Image: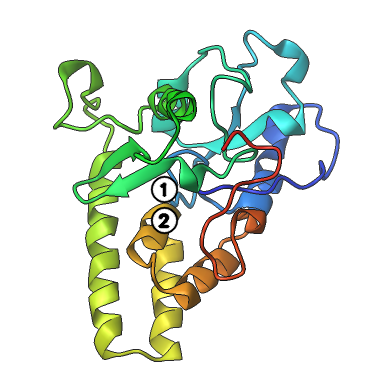
Amino acid sequence: MRPITRIAAPQVYTRYQDAIDDLENCFGRYCSYCERFIPTGLAVEHVSPKSSDSARETDWTNFLIGCNNCNSTKGVKITNNQDFLWPDRDNTLMAIEYKAGGLVEPSVSLAPHIKQKATALIELVGLDRHPGQPLAKQPARRDKRYMDREEVWTLAQVARRTLANNNNIDFREYIVSTAKKAGFFSIWLTVFDDDSDMRCRLVEAHAGTAKDCFENDWTLKSRAGGHI
């Protein structure tokens, strides 16, 4: 999951719906959870549900961007900053692994108490819903997130193989532009895990990506103040 940097509130909001343009300018037109690129129809997502935390209904620090699937799965479940990881607070790239077939899992390298928090985040929005999972984790009929991940995984793998035979700046920039439209930032970063130049280009091209989650060579590092 792409870690993001939240800037200071651009304005004071009387209605939370009015924040969507500022959120898209800050984070890009991507769901903060599943990372799909969605040109239209994204919504303001309340980290702490407005139904149970009305005092933060128009609080910029309580906003992320959500797609229909992630929003509906999360619903009004009570959340907090202790039991979950969050992309605006933690280096969530260190916490979640993306694999062939559209699979999403907590990183095997996590300490047990951090794995619990990563699992809580994954389950909160249903990123682990997949036809290969037990009945309780089967995707709803209209939940195609796993299919989209699988398609982008394949696309990124093809791009990597092609780059091996066409390694020039123009093709690298083409990969970046493709990644921006395809979405699923974490998949692209995973596929190009040993190519620091591509990782740099991908981070720089996605507005709002938290650069403090990367070392100078674009490998991952712990985020100041985060759980990991």
Instruction: Give the residue at mark 1.
Output: 36
- Relative side of 156 to 123, left or right: left
Q: Residue at x 43, y 26 (%)?
A: 112
In front here: 102 or 181? Answer: 102
Q: Residue at x 25, y 81 (%)?
A: 162
Q: Quadrant of the C terminus?
A: top right
Q: Quadrant of residue 23?
A: top right
Q: Residue furthest top?
A: 52
Q: Is residue 126 above or below residue 40?
A: above
Q: How many marks?
A: 2
Name the element at disc 1. Answer: loop
- Colour scheme of the picture: rainbow
Q: Measured from the top left, where is residue 172 in percent x and y?
A: 42, 81
Neighbour tally class for label 1: few under 14, some 14-19, many 20 plus, Cα within 10 Å? many
Instruction: Give the residue at mark 2.
Output: 183
Q: Measured from the top left, where is residue 219 in percent x and y?
A: 51, 62
Q: Measured from the top left, where is residue 156 in percent x and y?
A: 30, 65
Of the numbered discs 1 and 2, the one sitting upstream in the chain is 1
Name the element at disc 2. Answer: loop
Q: Measured from the top left, where is residue 226 in percent x and y?
A: 64, 37
In front here: 227 or 5? Answer: 227
Q: Is residue 160 above or below residue 42?
A: below
Q: Residue at x 31, y 39 (%)?
A: 104
Q: Residue at x 36, y 27 (%)?
A: 126
Instruction: Give the numbered dot on residue 225.
Output: none
Question: Amino acid under label 1?
Answer: Arg
- Relative side of 89 to 134, left or right: right
Q: Could you tell me if the residues under marks 1 and 2 are in contact, i.e. CB atoms within 8 Å?
A: yes
Q: Does residue 1 appear anywhere in the picture? A: no
Question: Amino acid under label 2?
Answer: Gly
Q: CA distance from mark 1 to mark 2?
A: 5 Å
